[in-house]
Image (tube, rainbow, N blue to C red):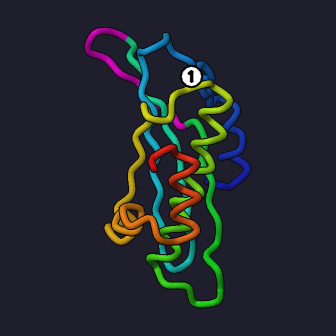
Amino acid sequence: MSFHKYLEKLQNVSIPRKVLPKPNEFQIHGFCDASQEAHGACIYIRSRCSENTWQVRLLCARSSVAPINGSTIPRVELNGALVLAKLLQKLTDAWEIDRHKCHLWTDSTVVLSWLNAKSHNRVNQILELTNAS
């Protein structure tokens, strides 16, 4: 199938826009990750539809190419965590959500240990943005 045929099929795609659920009926989950080439972060909302049903929707995401200066993967992972912290700040300010009720996830044990050590400028900035200090 040609590219133009795919474009025609896109007219039939609809994306639900409602993301603001009832108060106290939602959770915010943010994820960050990195590789040698890039880092990024995304935030999802998980909201209750009924007693046993939840829906999950992507709220926002951001990615960036890793620096070409040969940064280590842990440092690029830390940049991804900083991007997530900045996204979270924008979201919680706009929606007036308590940041302590948001769940942030990374697969980098190095970043987690740096966050617990509180010794780097980026770490301090992340802790300030997420009120985790």
Q: Residue visible at 52% across and 42% down?
A: 43
Q: Residue visible at 62% across and 35% down?
A: 91
- Does 72 sit left or right of 122 as displayed? left
Q: Residue visible at 58% across and 69% down?
A: 121
Query: Magenta residues, as a range?
Result: 50-58
- Label 1 packing within 10 angstroms: few (<14), some (14-19), many (20+): some
Quadrant hosting residue 125: bottom right
Is disc 1 placed on a helix, strand or loop?
A: loop
Q: Is 70 above or below relative to 132?
A: below
Dot 1 corresponds to which residue? Answer: 19
Residue type beneath disc 1: Val
Residue 21: x, y in percent?
A: 51, 15
Q: 102 or 41, which is in the foreground?
A: 102
Q: Residue furthest left?
A: 52
Quadrant hosting residue 109: bottom left
Question: Mainly helix, strand or loop, the magenta region?
Answer: strand
Q: Is 130 above or below relative to 33?
A: above
Residue 14: x, y in percent?
A: 62, 27
Q: 44 or 133, which is in the foreground?
A: 133
Q: 76 or 17, which is in the foreground?
A: 76
Q: Residue visible at 51% across and 80% down?
A: 36
Residue 122: x, y in percent?
A: 57, 66
- Does 106 sit left or right of 37 as displayed? left
Residue 129: x, y in percent?
A: 58, 48
Q: Is 30 above or below relative to 78?
A: above
Report if residue 74 lies within the magenta region: no
